[in-house]
């Protein structure tokens, strides 16, 4: 048994090492965009903190969803959070699966660049919306009589900038139109719809996003309008980004004889084949054939994934120096 496990573990390590080298080169080029996307998550939190100071508790507004869906109550409010957390974790793990499996269809760094661009655009629209008009929060801690429904004026700027994480996020009020949970869920599902490969998983993901919206309404965390606006706004933003900007995984392949090339002007000659061989095989001159045999398709066309072909990114990397 150990004689069988050792070669398999070595192949996994070799694959992780090869992917890490390629992704690291992309990360060195695009780290500023990733950092901005992550920093904007904090900016979004500060904006939500500001609107909490502006929030005025009042009777809940009439809502069709509240009439149709029975109220889950405080004891079952965890249901929507549990489903959302599961979707979030599974999506993050999926974006890193190419480090372990053969069926690589995207670059992890570039995929997250695109995801963060869409998230930032949606969150910017959300900030403008909930700061423009404050609605009385339907959540239990935002109703009249709750001690956290209205915050006292901040004593200094630090109280606003520190956003009282995580309590200030969990018990926020006023940041309603539109739902932040639905933004993340729809972006993740739409991304998997385009770059994923399992049809049943895509259907399950869409079904889960619909259930998440219903649970959010039934938990009285958002009005129905918050969920409805999130659906068409996020999908429109995703469509706009997808059409107006070049796809982050591919460029024009017509002039390269069908060979995939690294996007966004990454220099292949910066990745030396000798370094790849040393890291993956422990010595120079071996492993090229094995790497060439690990072929996978990376190029989605018109939103659909093609079957595996003989052109691979690893072959291009290993032969990049020969093209000079």
Image: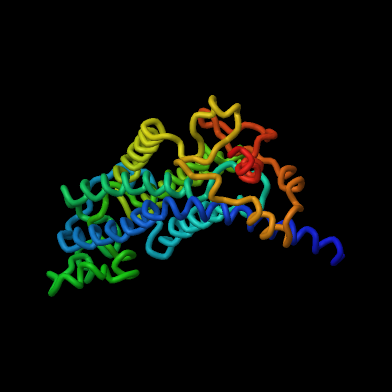
Left or right of residue 281, residue 268 in this image = left
Q: Residue furthest top?
A: 254
Q: Is residue 214 visible?
A: no
Q: Which percent across, then down, holds residue 48?
A: 25, 58
Vertical order, 266 against 81 (above or below): above
Q: How many marks?
A: 0
Q: Residue at x 36, y 33 (%)?
A: 240
Q: Quadrant of the N terminus?
A: bottom right
Q: Which percent across, then down, holds residue 293?
A: 74, 43
Quadrant assignment, res 2: bottom right
Q: Which percent across, then down, holds residue 211?
A: 47, 46
Q: Residue at x 60, y 32 (%)?
A: 259
Q: Is residue 107 visible?
A: yes
Q: Residue at x 39, y 30 (%)?
A: 243
Viewer-proximal residue, 103 or 137? 103
Left or right of residue 145, residue 113 in this image = right
Q: Quadrant of the C terminus?
A: top right
Left or right of residue 52, residue 31 in this image = right
Viewer-proximal residue, 183 or 1? 1
Viewer-proximal residue, 4 or 180? 4
Quadrant assignment, res 292: top right
Vertical order, 58 against 152 (above or below): above
Image colouring: rainbow
Q: Residue at x 32, y 59 (%)?
A: 39
Q: Which percent across, then down, holds residue 161?
A: 23, 67
Q: Residue furthest bottom?
A: 155
């Amino acid at each position: 048994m150990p004689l069988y496990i050792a070669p398999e573990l070595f192949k996994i390590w070799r694959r992780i090492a090869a992917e890490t080298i390629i992704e690291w080169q992309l990360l060195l080029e695009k780290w500023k965009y990733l950092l901005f996307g992550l920093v904007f998550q904090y900016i979004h939190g500060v904006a939500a903190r500001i609107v909490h100071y502006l929030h005025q508790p009042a009777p809940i507004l009439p809502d069709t969803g509240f009439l149709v869906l029975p109220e889950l109550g405080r004891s079952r409010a965890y249901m929507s959070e549990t489903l959302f957390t599961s979707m979030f974790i599974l999506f993050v793990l999926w974006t890193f699966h190419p480090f372990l499996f053969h069926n690589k269809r995207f670059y992890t760094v570039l995929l997250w660049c695109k995801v963060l661009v869409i998230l930032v655009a949606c969150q910017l629209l959300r900030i403008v919306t909930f700061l423009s008009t404050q609605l009385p929060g339907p959540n239990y801690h935002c109703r009249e009589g709750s001690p956290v429904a209205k915050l006292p004026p901040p004593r200094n700027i630090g109280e606003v900038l520190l956003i009282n994480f995580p309590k200030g996020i969990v018990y926020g009020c006023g940041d309603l139109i539109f739902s932040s949970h639905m933004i993340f869920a729809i972006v993740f599902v739409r991304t998997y719809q385009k770059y994923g490969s399992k049809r049943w998983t895509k259907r399950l993901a869409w079904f889960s996003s619909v259930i998440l919206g219903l649970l959010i309404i039934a938990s009285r965390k958002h009005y129905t309008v918050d969920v409805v606006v999130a659906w068409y706004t996020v999908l429109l933003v995703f469509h706009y980004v997808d059409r107006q900007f070049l796809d982050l995984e591919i460029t024009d392949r017509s002039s390269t004889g069908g060979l995939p090339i690294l996007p966004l002007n990454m220099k292949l000659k910066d990745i030396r084949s000798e370094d790849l061989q040393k890291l993956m095989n422990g010595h120079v001159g071996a492993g090229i054939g094995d790497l060439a045999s690990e072929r996978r398709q990376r190029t989605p066309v018109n939103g659909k994934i093609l079957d595996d072909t003989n052109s691979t990114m690893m072959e291009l990397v290993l032969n990049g120096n020969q093209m000079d």
